Image: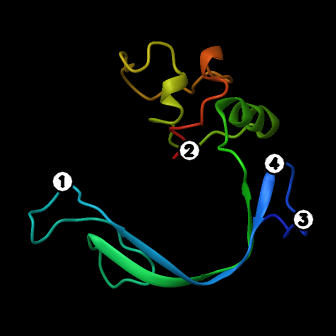
Amino acid sequence: PPSPPAASPPPGAVALPAAHSFLFSTRGLEIEGDDAHGVDAQFPWEEAPRREHSHTLAVPPLFIDRHPVTTANYSAYRRATGYAPKDALNWLSNWRPGWPFTTPPGPAPLPPKSPPPRMADWPVTYVS
């Protein structure tokens, strides 16, 4: 279930005010297709995928972490919740022994509960 709205920033977070006219603009190029028909992303307000996107959004006030989530933070979250995705193919693959030089055959094993110690303060990656 969704978390209830917070009245004040959680520890380590800051409040961002609402932006009533935020210009969302991005572009990308995927390797599929040719120059005239390349494939990219499609956002909810678009009729079809395209390479260039520009749309004005109203963004409500929100809280955002002051610093990126570290591998140690994410490890604590995993221990507290028991979270694991349904498909763990590349999930936290850089926590696995031998990464990036080894890829075990067959279904992806779950990564260790904690990252290698040298990575504790690194931003967490391979989570989506």
Camera-near label (1 vs 3) is 3
Above or below, 87 against 13 in this view is above
Amino acid on which the number 3 mark rests in the picture = Ser
- Is label 1 in contact with label 2 (beta carbons under 8 Å)? no
Residue at mark 4? 12
Badge 2: how crowded within 10 Å, few (<14), some, or many (20+)?
few
Q: Earlier in the sequence, mark 2 or mark 3?
A: 3
Residue at image mark 2:
86
Q: In the image, which is nearer the foreground, mark 4 or mark 1?
A: 4
Q: Identify residue type, mark 4.
A: Gly
What amino acid type should be assigned to the residue bearing mark 2?
Answer: Lys
Q: Are marks 4 and 3 in contact (CB under 8 Å)?
A: no
The answer to whether the residue labelled 2 contacts the one labelled 3, judged by CB atoms less than 8 Å apart, is no
Q: Quadrant of residue 105?
A: top left
Q: To which quarter of the image does residue 127 belong? A: top right
Residue shown at the point (66%, 28%) measured from the top left:
121
Secondary structure beneath label 3: loop
Q: Going by the image, does 84 lie left or right of 48? A: right
Q: Are marks 4 and 2 in contact (CB under 8 Å)?
A: no
Q: Which residue is mark 1?
A: 31
- Between disc 4 and disc 1, whose residue precedes? 4
In the rendering, at what x and y percent does residue 7 appear? Answer: 91, 69
Query: Up-down: is 74 above or below 8?
Result: above
